[in-house]
Image: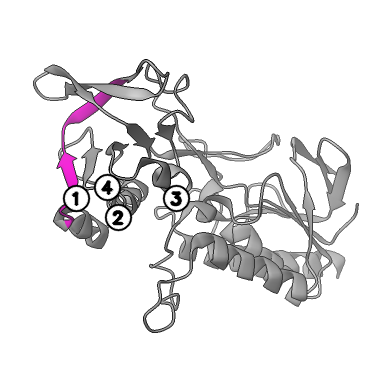
Amino acid sequence: MTSDLLIIGAGPAGLAAAQYGSRSGLVTTVVEQLAPGGQALLIDRLENYPGNIGAEGQEPKTGFEVAEDMRRQAEQFGARFISGTVKSIRKNTAVFEAATQDETLTAPSVIIATGAKRKLLNVPGELELYGKGVSYCAACDGPFFKNKRIFVIGGGDAACDEARYLARLTKTVILLHRRDKLRAQKAIVERTLRNPNITVRFNTRLTAIKGGAYENVAAVSLENAVTGEKTEEPADAVFIFAGSSPQMPGIEGLVLDEAGYIVTNQRMETSIPGLFAAGDVRATPFRQVVVAVGEGAIAAHCAAEWLSAASA
């Protein structure tokens, strides 16, 4: 399949790029391995997205609802979506070739918007008890643990947001953070600390997750990061939000930062002419839906300009 613009990934950045690419008159194809929306699909209430306040007396739209609106909007402008996983990208003269499990997609310009994936803690019991009380998505699995004792691991925006969501389901949410203060945005931190159903424990590490007689989560092993004291406490569920790492197809010659994120300029141009990057896969100081959407729009706009100049 040949396009003018190929977008790899259909998170907020890819969806915004699809809209702006199509509106620029480019034949635009988006390839996504899962469902359009990326990690935004896990957001219960997208309350910090500009304008998404909901009608009077109603909650803001969920991440899923916003993503679905963006997908339909992009399709209305002419973008086409296909399901697949891009394994590798290479540049063949003036055209990029993106290999999926089924076919090779070609385009003179490509936007990588593949986002980032959740990091594992790699503690004993994490993988063994996944789906049995260990989860990485509060909106997905939280309702299974109403009125239960829930541990949340992490100190960033995601951990705080998910802890507050879970606090609507139970009065016993324990948020563990290995450092002495939360690293989330100030407003989010303040709401988390004020929530009567959330207990925040600083300088605390999760060292193991233990199962019970029915092979479900039954207890957690903890360690004080300052004193080294080790304890064990009962638990019904453990929700892990320990950060993320970039995910992208293999491509030679791409400049990355020390953490593996793609380095671009302000035009979202990578080190390879015609190849752009946007969203969480890109080296950026602030990973939010609103940022990803803006970067996707810039990437598509600049890709259209690049294509125009290349064909002149």
In the figure, is residue 40 to the left or right of 184? right
- The CA distance from mark 4 to mark 1 is 7 Å
Q: Main secondary structure of the magenta part?
A: strand
Q: Residues within 10 Å of mark 3 (few under 14, many from 20)?
A: some
N-terminal-most mark, 1 or 3: 3
**Image location (x, y in percent) of residue 198:** 20, 47
* Quadrant position of residue 70: bottom right
N-terminal-most mark, 4 or 1: 4
Residue that appears at 68% across and 73% down? 73
Mark yes or no: residue 302 visible.
Answer: no
**Image location (x, y in percent) of residue 312:** 86, 70
Q: Which residue is mark 3?
A: 139
Q: Describe the element under mark 3 as helix, strand or loop.
A: helix
Q: Residues within 10 Å of mark 4 (few under 14, many from 20)?
A: some
- The CA distance from mark 2 to mark 4 is 6 Å
In the figure, is residue 265 to the left or right of 258? right
* Quadrant position of residue 274: bottom right
Q: Which residue is mark 2?
A: 168
Q: Which residue is mark 4?
A: 170
Q: Amino acid at mark 1?
A: Asn
Q: Which mark is residue 107?
A: none
Residue that appears at 75% across and 36% down? 88
Question: What's drawn in magenta, residue-wise?
Answer: 195-208
- The CA distance from mark 3 to mark 2 is 11 Å
N-terminal-most mark, 3 or 4: 3
With respect to residue 235, does 253 lie above or below?
below
Q: Which residue is mark 1?
A: 197
Q: Are marks 1 and 2 in contact (CB under 8 Å)?
A: yes
